[in-house]
Image (tube, rainbow, N blue to C red):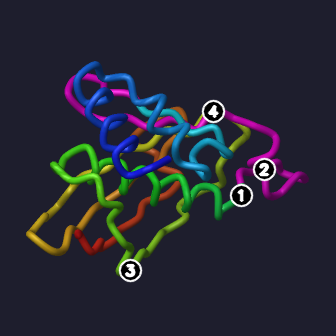
Amino acid sequence: MTQSEMKHCWQLARENGDYSAVIVAIPYARTIGMQMAEQAGELRFTLPFAQSNVGNVLLPALHGGVIGGFLETAAVLTLLTSAETNAIPKVVDFSIDYLRSGRPVDLYGRCEIVRQGKRVANVLMTAWQDDLAKPVASARAHFLLS
């Protein structure tokens, strides 16, 4: 997808609240089956359960890398949605805490931009399954903005 096509895709998504075309344009998000929607003025991310996202088949449990990638992608999409830029933010650092096993059910995520300057943004991310008060993972990241 060219830069102008991506810009047009973001404009349409911002106007009508349908981010499915944006997700399709990001190969990793498309591969894991990630979804994005706006609910009550807040972006919510969903990772519907898929057998291909399981890392430990004995438990079974979601792969930690899938959870981390889901949260990182959610943070990038949150930054892109909040900013008037279409340039992909670059990860400066990323730290994740795995708090409990990701069971074989849907995973949800949300992000909070703690601080956003002209060049750097700090984002907190949370992933949960049935109860937001019982997160599966939480992460913190800094991004370089173009």
Q: Are marks 4 and 2 in contact (CB under 8 Å)?
A: no
Residue furthest to the right in view is: 58
17 or 10: nearer the viewer: 10
Q: In the rendered structure, find residue 63 and report the number of the disc placed on it.
A: 1
* Residue 70 x, y percent position in the rendering: 53, 52
Q: In the rendered structure, find residue 54 and report the number of the disc placed on it.
A: 2
Q: Which residues are magenta?
A: 37-62
Question: Cα distance, mark 2 to mark 3?
Answer: 25 Å
Q: Are marks 2 and 1 in contact (CB under 8 Å)?
A: yes
Q: Secondary structure at mark 4?
A: loop
Q: Earlier in the sequence, mark 4 or mark 2?
A: 4
Q: Earlier in the sequence, mark 3 or mark 4?
A: 4
Depth-wise, is mark 3 or mark 1 nearer the camera? 3
Vertical placement of 60 versus 68: above or below? above
Mark 3: few, some, or many residues within 10 Å (few <14, many ≥20)?
Answer: few
Q: Are marks 3 and 1 in contact (CB under 8 Å)?
A: no
Q: In the rendered structure, find residue 93 and report the number of the disc placed on it.
A: 3
Type of amino acid under label 3: Asp
* Residue 69 x, y percent position in the rendering: 55, 59
Vertical placement of 17 versus 93: above or below? above
Question: Cα distance, mark 3 to mark 1?
Answer: 21 Å
Type of amino acid under label 4: Pro
* Residue 62 x, y percent position in the rendering: 71, 51
Question: Cα distance, mark 3 to mark 4?
Answer: 27 Å
Q: Earlier in the sequence, mark 4 or mark 1?
A: 4
Question: Cα distance, mark 4 to mark 1?
Answer: 13 Å
